[in-house]
Amino acid sequence: MYVILVYDVNVARVAKVLKIARKYLHWVQNSVLEGELTEATFRKLKHELGQVIDVKEDSVLFYVLGNQRYTTRELLGVKKGGEEWIW
């Protein structure tokens, strides 16, 4: 499955969330990561993030797509994320 992760968390937890997410996904830009995951790695990612975030204050969204093949990306403005873009 192809996953796009978007997060909005308290500044005190941003580095922890980013560190965990980067273990599984490619950083695209501020608070956005994406990549191909298996069901097992997706569960592991959600579990790890669930232990770091405050569910009463933070938000993590997962857009789960069948695969990257049927998606397109358009950019308006500055490309962030360096060479880690995988498209």
Image (cartoon, rainbow, N blue to C red):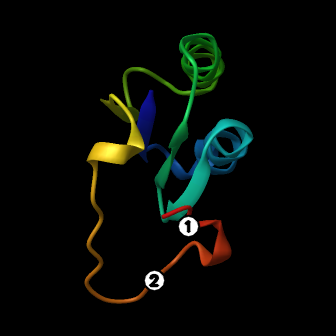
Given residues 19 and 25, the one toward you in this image is 25
Picture quarter with the N terminus: top left
N-terminal of the two: label 2 or label 1?
Answer: 2
Q: Are marks 2 and 1 in contact (CB under 8 Å)?
A: yes
Residue 58 drawn at (x, y percent): 41, 34
Which residue type does callout 1 highlight?
A: Trp
- Residue at 36%, 45% (x, y): give it: 69
Crowding near the residue tagged with mark 1, few <14, some 14–19, many ≥20 C-alpha atoms within 10 Å: some
Question: Nearer the viewer's eye, disc 2 or disc 1?
Answer: 1
Q: Which residue is mark 2?
A: 79
Residue 42 drawn at (x, y percent): 55, 20
Q: Secondary structure at mark 2?
A: loop
Name the image quarter holding residue 59. top left
75 up-or-down from 51: above or below: below
From this viewpoint, which residue is outermost toward the front? 69
The alpha-carbon separation of the residues under discs 2 and 1 comes to: 9 Å
Q: Which residue is mark 1?
A: 85
Task: State the mark number for residue 26.
Answer: none
From this viewpoint, which residue is outermost toward the bottom? 77
